[in-house]
Amino acid sequence: MKILICGKGGTGKSTLTALLGKEMAGRGKRVLIIDSDESNFGLPALLGMDKPRDFMEYLGGKKVLFERVKTLEKGMKTDSLPSGYFSEKGTIKLLSVGKIYEFGEGCACPINALSSKFLENVELETDELLIADTDAGVEHLGRGVERGCDVLLVVVGPSRESIELAKRVTTMVKNLGKQVYYILNKTDDESERTLLDSLPRGMVIASIPNDKRISLYGLQGSELDLKLEGIGKIADFLKEKAGPL
């Protein structure tokens, strides 16, 4: 199964990616995490890993990426990923598609194009799971990144902008035949009620309360070492409702 995590900036997409990846690894899965957010550098630390070399370098770098991405072949296996372009800890692998480092180097379009092609072409074994952490907003939708996934998890924080973006994502993928679900994050009792009243109940699969410990881990740049009930609920739901894991 290929799971894509998206949502408004600051809702906690990378945090949930790391926590869900660790939860699935703890359940006996081999997990491939795809970091396709060109501007967020924090995911490796949350996983307790060093940042891998950008995968776009393997294809010659950003300037030639649009042409070289066509060389990716259908049926790629995670075990055949080029050495040096992923970090690994236990049964979790992390692949970073690419980042923007320099002033004036251009947009993230090539990075999203590579993410889209990779997700479409990579082929998972029965004991494998892929989780893709996307950039904030909807640019990845414009580049068709969602085409290669099976399930979209939209992270919704306690803001009206986050609610509206979640609805827009749902509208944009309605003709793709993908399963879309919402995860409420950073909530308290009042904001959770408001979010539930603003979204289709059947699409909300978990609500994760605001936890100051998570902010501290992020501030320190240290590995997330937490077991949250909400993350377990997401994993259980995916197993029961979204197909076999």
Image: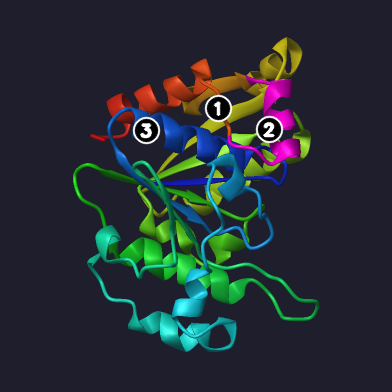
Closer to the N terminus: mark 3 or mark 2?
A: 3
- Picture layout, residue 26 above or below residue 93: above
Mark 3, secondary structure of its residue = helix
Residue on which the image places disc 3: 24
Mark 3 in CB contact with mark 1 (< 8 angstroms): no
Marks 2/1: CA distance? Answer: 9 Å
Question: Do labels 2 and 1 touch, CB within 8 Å?
Answer: yes
Q: Residue at x 54, y 42 (%)?
A: 48
Badge 2 marks a residue whose secondary structure is: helix
Residue 82 at x, y percent in the picture: 35, 70
Location of residue 57 with respect to 142 vertically, above or below? below
Say whether residue 1 is visible: no
Q: From what the image shows, is residue 236 above or below residue 49?
A: above
Numbered badge on residue 225: 1
Q: In the rendered image, which quarter contains the C terminus?
A: top left
Mark 1 neighbour class, 10 Å CA radius: few under 14, some 14 to 19, many 20 or more: some
Predominant secondary structure in magenta?
Answer: helix
Q: Which mark, residue 217?
A: 2
Name the foreground residue: 12 vs 82. Answer: 82
Identity, as a three-letter code, of the amino acid under mark 2: Tyr
- Which is more foreground, mark 3 or mark 2? 2
Question: Which residue is more in the foreground, 25 or 39?
Answer: 25
Q: Secondary structure at mark 1?
A: loop
Instruction: State the image quarter where residue 218 is shown.
Output: top right
The mark found on residue 79 in the picture is none
Task: Tell me which segment is drawn in magenta.
Answer: 209-223
| Amino acid type, callout 3 | Met
Position in image of residue 18 (x %, y %): 52, 39
